[in-house]
């Protein structure tokens, strides 16, 4: 609690939130924003000159690997990586060992997360053991605060089970069923996008149709049941078009996309390096353009990293044997600024919406003080972003326990500088404080 | 040239140089003592994660005919520890002091990964569905020995399960690089995805192309594929795409029949056709040692093709 | 001196010295703008070469008391052409047709792996060498390593009764105990110098020539 009694001033920044933008100092005390204006003073000062002061970023989709695979990441190290990336809240995915399908495990994740430098929120499984058959105890988990229910890593294959899950979730306020949309019958056995590259490399493919068929099916089921549905890591032009159509019809459909799906294509697999292996896989340039367009017009509501740490031993195998997944927490903001904002695909305000207040709304994290406008009385979950600093991604310099980033050596512009979690500066000048 | 991983890494000049060099080695293999001291003192390791006695023996014979020493690690003999990571296995082998590793692995790209872990020269003897470069080289050499050095304009049809075939991928690249015109023949389920991006023609009707080809290259059809709903039965496959005696009779007079082996007699090729004079299948096998000698010599002995 | 602007084939350079140890750079023949190598002397003209061929042909027959049981084996890349000329000469005055073969020594060289070594042509000897007198034929004898490799290659083909060596030029600097039985011209040279043989059959020139080239010497 050191420093909470003193006031903290973020001086000289440009405040951007859902209500607009203005240059202003931000004064924080007792975990809340106290004042926003010019020429303020405080006991402790963090320089925000030339920087953007925004609500802390919210990541709907991270794999913290604890319990079960702590070699790759722990809740603590993942939270630190998140804070460095500018995130004040993350939703932990349930494909742990044991999976997050019962109250005891979920409770322990919540407890472990409570002492870290990020607000770690747990998701819960849709089905027991993510096996796709029996519903998990969603009510019990909802009582613990779970709002996002997903079998991520696996797709709920049975239309019947998916329908029942959607219907049941309607009775839990704020609950959202989130689908990993890949039809196993079409995608299983595949390791990269099915197309010209997989044809040339002789690697079995996962067709875009595997995503499109499930998205189409689940939109239909959402309409049937009147329940909201959220699509994780949308990667194909076809799925983006389906979600756009559903929204135009007024259905409660939301979607997220990962940075690797708007910055990389399947050509990256040409060297057989499993650093570029992920499910759903890297796709074609056409799909990348569609994802960007979806982020621009709001079809895709959120940027979510799908941060998936793997130990070097795990990725040091053949392409077909290695597990899928890439790191994302410490590069998402910079990639968004460099590849979307700078070229004019998104305005800065829209980018921050996709990274902060829009995902916060989907997960109900706005009610926990994330993503909200920076006004007196708001919980002080903030990030301070330097939009101009140039840096190069160095895997050994990351706070994550793992090193599997596909962006090693990539030059980026823009980076998170400070992160304030409930009033506490957990990252100062790019250094984690604990 | 440090490694041979894929035919697409070789330009036309390098392909032709390797083939010219292979012809020198054909002469060596026909001598009473078919041996030269060129790679004396070098060690060539076979690392076979897939069972394939004939290809492995062909490589080992090639190494021995160059006076190199050989070592063998195979899954079949359990000298490859399946629990040990590929990286640990190759680094352990390298520590024994070796110059080249001939790798066959069920996963595409395994040889490429290995090049990042050890210093030895890596030779791809087949990686999943991806490539089998020496097979393509010996196929071209066999055609050259029959038809002269140029494949320009030669019409070659490759029939069968192209989708799952590393032989087909390597052959298509080698044949087209040398100027041949390739047609892929098979049911759509057995042709590669995005086949329109390949530099080939496509036909689903073997009878329509039979009379028009100079070379008919048959691929082996695997029984296991039937269980994956890729085609209804071997019987239907043979009736639509098998080289039966009746179909063989409709081939052009000088047309050649090829197959990478082992043959499923009565499935992709009728027994009597396999033994006929149009079939150069046994010459393919004979060319294999000379080609592998040429590749080993190029990787370990010559310091690379002269520019 | 001939000032040809035609550039010889790349393989010609590799065997210019018939010597694996040679590291001297070899600019294109006839290139007037060469800063490094200059023509020093014309060692043998086309006429000189013709007389040398004839004399060597006579010496071979004289030394072996006739032309029976002889086989000439030329070492690539110019040996076969020289061997062919010798065979023609021998046939013209002895009336005997001597078999001519070709030998490539690439796979027997001792510098494999140290530098690019590619075969220069096929190995084809039309008769069994066992029991015969084999006369190896090459253009230049230098360190002797090529001939050593040729002896090893020859052993693979059979067991000759005897092996003799005929060369157009012996330029000294032997590194192995090898000597020629028949020599067109003895030519003392410095290590850095370059003996260039050009034959009508192999080098795309109008007339044969053997020239000695050397590096430009700057300074007083």
Image (cartoon, coloured by chain):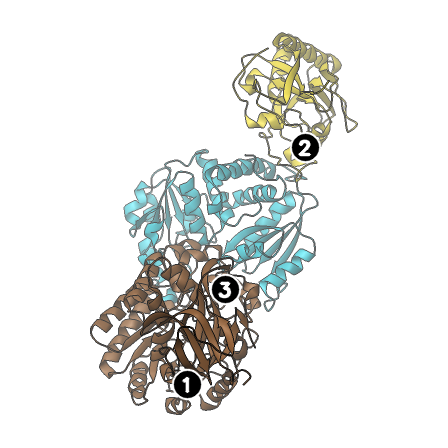
Chain colours: A brown, B cyan, C yellow
Q: In the figure, is residue B106 to the left or right of B190? A: right
Q: Residues within 10 Å of mark 3 (few under 14, many from 20)?
A: many
Residue farthest left in this picture: A249
**Is residue B29 shown left or right of residue A132?**
right
What residue appears at the point 59 percent right and 17 percent down from the top-left corner?
C199
Q: Nearer the viewer, residue B27 or C183?
A: C183
Q: Is residue C65 above or below residue A391?
A: above
Residue carrying label 1: A128
Residue B250 appears in the figure: no
In terms of image quadrants, where is residue A342? bottom left
Badge nearest the viewer, 1 or 2: 1
Asked if C150 appears above or below C49 in the picture, the reply is below
- How far separated are the C-alphas under marks 1 and 2? 74 Å
**Same subunit under labels 1 and 2?**
no
Q: Of callouts 3 and 1, which one flags the residue occurring earlier in the amino acid sequence?
A: 1
As rendered, which of A265 and A144 lies closer to the eye? Answer: A144
**Can you see residue A101?**
yes
């Amino acid at each position: 609690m050191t420093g909470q009694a003193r006031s903290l001033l973020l001086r000289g920044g440009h405040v951007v939130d859902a209500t607009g933008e203005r240059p202003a100092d931000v004064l924080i005390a007792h975990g809340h924003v106290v004042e926003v204006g010019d020429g303020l003073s405080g006991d402790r000062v963090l320089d925000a000159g030339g920087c953007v002061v925004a609500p802390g970023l919210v990541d709907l989709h991270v794999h913290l690997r604890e319990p079960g695979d702590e070699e790759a990441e722990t809740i603590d190290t993942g939270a630190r990586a998140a804070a460095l990336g500018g995130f004040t809240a993350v939703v932990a995915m349930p494909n742990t060992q044991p999976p997050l399908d019962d109250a005891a495990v979920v409770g322990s994740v919540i407890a472990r997360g409570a002492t870290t430098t990020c607000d770690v929120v747990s998701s819960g499984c849709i089905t027991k053991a993510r096996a796709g058959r029996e519903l998990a105890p969603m009510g019990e988990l909802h009582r613990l605060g779970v709002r996002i229910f997903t079998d991520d890593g696996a797709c709920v294959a049975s239309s019947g089970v998916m329908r029942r899950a959607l219907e049941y979730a309607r009775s839990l306020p704020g609950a959202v069923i989130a689908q990993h949309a890949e039809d196993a019958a079409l995608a299983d056995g595949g390791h990269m996008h099915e197309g010209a590259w997989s044809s040339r490399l002789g690697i079995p493919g996962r067709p875009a149709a595997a995503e499109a068929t499930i998205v189409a099916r689940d939109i239909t089921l959402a309409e049937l049941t009147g329940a909201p549905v959220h699509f994780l890591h949308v990667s194909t032009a076809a799925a983006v078009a389906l979600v756009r159509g559903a929204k135009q019809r007024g259905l409660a459909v939301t979607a997220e996309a990962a940075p690797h799906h708007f910055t990389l294509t399947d050509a990256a697999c040409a060297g057989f390096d499993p650093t570029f292996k992920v499910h759903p896989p890297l796709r074609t340039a056409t799909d990348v353009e569609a994802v960007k367009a979806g982020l621009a017009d709001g079809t895709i509501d959120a940027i979510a990293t799908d941060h998936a740490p793997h130990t070097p031993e795990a990725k040091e195998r053949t392409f077909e044997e290695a597990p899928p997944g890439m790191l994302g927490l410490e590069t998402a903001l910079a990639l968004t600024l460099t590849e979307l904002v700078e070229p004019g695909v998104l305005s800065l305000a829209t980018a921050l919406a996709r990274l902060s207040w829009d995902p916060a709304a989907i997960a109900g994290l706005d009610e926990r003080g994330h993503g909200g406008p920076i006004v007196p009385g708001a919980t002080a979950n903030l990030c301070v972003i330097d939009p101009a600093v140039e840096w190069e991604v160095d895997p050994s310099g990351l706070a994550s326990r793992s090193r599997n980033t596909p962006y090693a050596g990539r030059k980026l512009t823009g980076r998170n500088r400070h992160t304030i979690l409930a009033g506490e500066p957990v990252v100062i000048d790019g250094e984690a404080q604990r | 040239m440090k490694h041979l991983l894929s035919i697409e890494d070789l330009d036309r000049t390098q392909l032709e140089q390797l083939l010219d060099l292979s012809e020198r080695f054909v002469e060596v293999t026909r001598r009473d003592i078919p041996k030269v001291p060129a790679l004396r003192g070098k060690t060539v390791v076979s690392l076979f994660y897939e069972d394939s006695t004939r290809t492995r023996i062909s490589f080992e014979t090639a190494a021995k005919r160059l006076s190199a020493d050989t070592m063998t690690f195979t899954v079949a003999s359990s000298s490859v520890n399946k629990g040990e990571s590929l990286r640990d296995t190759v680094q352990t082998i390298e520590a024994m002091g070796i110059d080249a590793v001939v790798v066959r692995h069920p996963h595409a790209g395994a040889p490429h990964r290995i090049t990042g872990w050890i210093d030895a020269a890596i030779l791809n003897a087949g990686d999943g569905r991806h490539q089998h470069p020496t097979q393509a080289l010996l196929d071209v050499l066999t055609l050259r020995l029959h038809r002269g050095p140029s494949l320009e304009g030669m019409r070659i049809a490759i029939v069968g399960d192209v989708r799952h075939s590393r032989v087909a991928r390597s052959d298509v690249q080698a044949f087209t690089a040398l100027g041949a015109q390739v047609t892929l023949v098979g049911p759509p389920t057995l042709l590669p995805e995005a086949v329109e991006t390949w530099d080939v023609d496509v036909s689903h009707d073997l009878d329509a192309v039979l009379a028009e080809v100079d070379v008919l290259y048959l691929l082996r059809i695997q029984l296991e594929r039937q269980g994956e709903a890729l085609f209804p039965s071997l019987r239907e496959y043979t009736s639509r795409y098998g080289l039966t005696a009746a179909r063989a009779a409709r081939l052009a007079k000088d047309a050649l029949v090829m197959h990478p082996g082992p043959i499923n007699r009565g499935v992709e090729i009728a027994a009597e056709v396999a033994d006929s004079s149009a079939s150069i299948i046994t010459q393919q096998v004979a060319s294999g040692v000379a080609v592998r000698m040429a590749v080993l010599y190029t990787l370990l002995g010559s310091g690379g093709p002269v520019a | 001196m001939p000032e040809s602007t035609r550039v010889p084939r790349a393989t010609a350079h590799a065997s210019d010295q018939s010597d694996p140890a040679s590291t001297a750079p070899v600019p294109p023949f006839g290139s007037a703008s060469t800063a490094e190598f200059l023509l020093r002397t014309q060692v043998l003209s086309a006429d000189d070469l013709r007389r040398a061929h004839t004399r060597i042909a006579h010496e071979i027959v004289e030394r072996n008391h006739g032309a029976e049981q002889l086989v000439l084996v030329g070492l690539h890349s110019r040996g076969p052409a020289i061997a062919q000329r010798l065979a023609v000469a021998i046939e013209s005055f002895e009336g005997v047709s001597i078999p001519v073969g070709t030998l490539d020594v690439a796979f027997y060289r001792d510098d494999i792996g140290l530098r690019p070594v590619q075969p220069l042509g096929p190995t084809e000897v039309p008769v069994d060498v066992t029991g015969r007198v084999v006369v190896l034929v090459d253009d230049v004898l230098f360190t002797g390593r090529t001939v050593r490799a040729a002896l090893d290659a020859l052993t693979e083909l059979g067991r000759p009764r005897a092996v003799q060596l005929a060369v157009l030029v012996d330029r000294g600097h032997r590194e192995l105990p090898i000597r020629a039985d028949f020599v067109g011209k003895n030519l003392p040279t410095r290590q850095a110098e370059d003996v260039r043989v050009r034959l009508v059959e192999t080098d795309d020139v109008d007339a044969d020539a053997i020239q000695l080239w050397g590096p430009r010497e700057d300074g007083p």
